[in-house]
Amino acid sequence: MDPRRIRDRLAGFPGVVCLHSKNLDSAAEFGLRADERVRTASTIKLPIMVAAFASVAAGRASWDEPLLLREEDKISGSGVLTEFSGGLRLPLRDLVHLMIVVSDNTATNLVLDRIGADAVNEQMDLLGLRETRCLRKVRGDGQQLKPPAGFSKAGLIPDNQRFGLGVSTPREMVVLLEKLDRGEVVSPEASKEMVAILRRQQSKDGIGRREGTVVASKSGSLDALRSDVGIVYSPGARIAMAITVDDMPRPDWSPENAGLLLIADLAAILTEELRSP
């Protein structure tokens, strides 16, 4: 791959970009700060989903078990459960779907309450992903932040607290996507189901922005950050990628956020370059 197109697009961009990408058919790769630890924002919900599937497969949880939604569980930000009545019980399966498909923050915390943040990290260890850590529960957005809670052991390490909800590297996220594609996460059937859920994820302003692009992905957002991890199903190739844009100087929550536009352009370049013979 010729890196000049990437360098040209990044020229003058006011932020820090870390990325890794791999053609899952040819094994061609490209990375930029691929092993740098980055804030995950909501992309950590992908490892949380993996841990939920592992817990069910091991008999420690059941997809049909009802989990109680209390008023005090509701968290601001993305999702729909803040509109539901307290006292409702929802099955674990539905909460996992909401956590990924609409990035529901309240659903994420209910899932973490059930399986535990440490269980997420133990599952990542089993997959060899030792830099990918779930650190705590979601606090919410903007001026409606709740006190930090639900810390994992990794989340209590002082140096990790600057990462917020979770930490990973672009390379490890691509490894996780590749393992899912190969059917190596929990089981072939579970891997296939997780990919299907990722394909239904509704935030398509990053790597899935271009018309006609088919992706299985999970995105994340903070004031200064945009992140997207996923598999692009391009004609003739499947391209896994993880792109994080951080330290942007101005918050912008519109679909035209400069980080989202950059991720879309980088995804298109990576797909075109890595699928070439």
Image: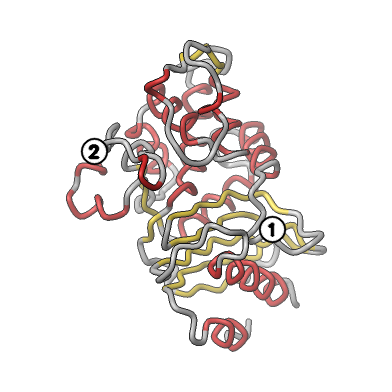
Looking at marks 2 and 1 on the same chain, the residue that comes earlier in the sequence is marked by 2
Residue position for label 2: 153
Q: Please state which of residues 131 and 212 is positioned toward the viewer in this rendering.
A: 212
- Residue drawn where x is 76% and y is 59% of the image: 213
* Quarter containing the N terminus: bottom right
Instruction: Give, as a three-letter code, the residue at label 1.
Output: Gly
The amino acid sitting under disc 2 is Lys
Q: Quadrant of residue 14?
A: bottom left
Rendered location of residue 145, percent (x, y): 34, 40
Expressed as whole percent of the image width and height from the top left, the position of residue 13 reads 49, 80
Quadrant of the rendered image containing residue 277: bottom right
Q: Is residue 7 above or below residue 154?
A: below
Decide which of 114, 58 is in the foreground and name it. Answer: 114
Task: Report the number of numbered marks.
Answer: 2
Q: In the rendered image, which residue does mark 1 sit on?
A: 208
Give residue 139's position: percent from left, percent from top: 35, 39
Q: Residue at x 20, y 42 (%)?
A: 156
Give percent across and percent down for residue 93: 58, 23
